[in-house]
Image: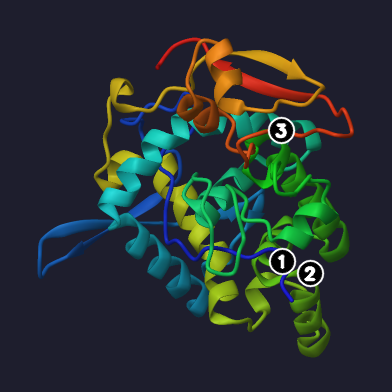
Amino acid sequence: MKAIRTTGLGVLLLLVSGLLINAVPKTPAKEVVVKSDGIKRYIPATAEFAGEPAPLNVADVRERFERELIVNANLDATTLLIIKRANRSFPIIEPILAKYGVPDDFKYLAVAESGLLNAVSPAGARGFWQFMEGAGRENGLEINGEVDERYHLEKSTEAACRYLLAAKQRFGSWTMAAASYNGGLAGVGKQVGIQKVSNYYDLLLTDETSRYVFRILALKEIMKNPALYGFTLSPEELYENLPVRKVEVDSTVTDLADFAMQQGINYKILKIHNPWLRDKKLGNAAKKKYTIDIPLRGY
C-alpha cells in the first residue's frame, strides 16, 4: 500500500518566488528545431534534483526526461494557472522546507502532486501534498470530521518534510525519497531488494513512479527557463498572497458563519482562507488552540 499517492496531474510550475519570467536561462540548453512545424524545442544539457545529477548520458534516462519536458511544456492552460498560483503558494512552502533542511526542489513535488491546489484524488488523497488519511496521521496531521490538516498548507508541508526526511534516511538520496513519495516506502524498498540497485535511475519501477521524478525535473527546468518554453506573465497577472491577521481560538465555535461575520467577513471567505475547517462548526472539546486566518483585504 502506498503511503502517499499522487493525483496523476501532469502539471508544471513555471515560477519561483521573485523569479523574473523573462530571465536569461540558468541552465545550459541545446536547441532542437522540429522542421515539420518550425517550432524550436529546448532540451537542457544537464539536469539535477536536490543537487543530485540525472545521468542524461544514459539513453533511456535522456528519453524519459525529454518525454516529460515536451509533454509538460505543452500544457498551456494548466501552466498559466499554476504560474499564477505559485506566486501565492511558494513563499509559504519555501521557508518550511528550509526550516526542516529539505531541499528547495521539493516544492516542485507539490506541483506534480496537486497543481498547487487542495485537490482530492479518486483514492482519497487530499491537499497540496496529497496525503492519504493514514499517512497524514502518521506524519502528525489532525484529521476528523471538523478539522483536516491535509488542507492546511503550512502543516501539511511540515508533514511532507517529516516523511521526506525519513525516506532520505532510509534510501540515502533525495531522488529516491522523491520516488518513494509516489511509490511508497515499502513499494520502492521491495524493488531495491529485488533488483539489487539503490539508484532511482537504475531501477525498473511502475510506469507512474518511473515517470514521477522526471516530471519533477521537467517542472523545474521549465520554471527556471520559462521564456524558452513560451511562457511570459507580468507580475500583475499573478495571484497574490493576501495579508491576514491571526485569530486564536481555544474553545467551541458553534456556528462558523456567525464567527465569520463577527470577524468582518463571510462564511465563504473564511473557508477559502481556512480550508482545513471542514464543518459548519468547530466543536473543540479538547480545548485545543487553533489559529484562523482572517484576510485584511481582497473580499
Secondary structure of the residue carrying numbered label 1: helix
Whole-number angstrom distance, CA of label 3 to CA of label 1: 35 Å
Q: As shown in the figure, which amino acid type bears the numbered disc 1?
A: Ser
Q: How far from the left and from the top, in percent, is residue 215?
A: 49, 61
Q: Earlier in the sequence, mark 1 or mark 2?
A: 1
Q: Is residue 225 visible?
A: no
Q: Residue at x 68, y 34 (%)?
A: 154
> Which amino acid, mark 3?
Leu
Q: Which-is-in-front pick, marks 3 and 1?
A: 3
- Above or below: residue 57 compared with residue 128: below
Q: Residue at x 45, y 61 (%)?
A: 9
Find residue 185 and name its label: 2
Q: Inspect the image, locate mark 2, and give the three-letter code of the amino acid beneath it.
A: Leu
Q: Which residue is mark 1?
A: 180
Occupied quadrant, residue 103: top right
Residue 93 image point, x, y percent: 62, 34
Q: Quadrant of residue 246?
A: top right
Q: Are marks 1 and 2 in contact (CB under 8 Å)?
A: yes
Picture quarter with the C terminus: top left
User: Within 10 angstroms of label 2, few (less than 14), some, or many (20 or more) residues?
Assistant: many
Residue 228 spot, x, y in % from top left: 29, 45
Dot 3 or dot 1, earlier in sequence: 1
Quadrant of the rendered structure where residue 196 is?
bottom right
Q: CA distance from mark 2 to mark 3?
A: 35 Å
In the picture as drawn, the residue positioned furthest to the bottom comes out as 194
Identify which residue is drawn at 59% across, 43% down.
Answer: 107
Query: How is the model colour-coded?
Result: rainbow
Q: Earlier in the sequence, mark 2 or mark 3?
A: 2
State the mark number for residue 282: 3
Q: Is residue 283 left or right of residue 11?
A: right
Distance of label 1 from label 2 (alpha carbons) = 5 Å
Q: Nearer the viewer, residue 225 or 286?
A: 286
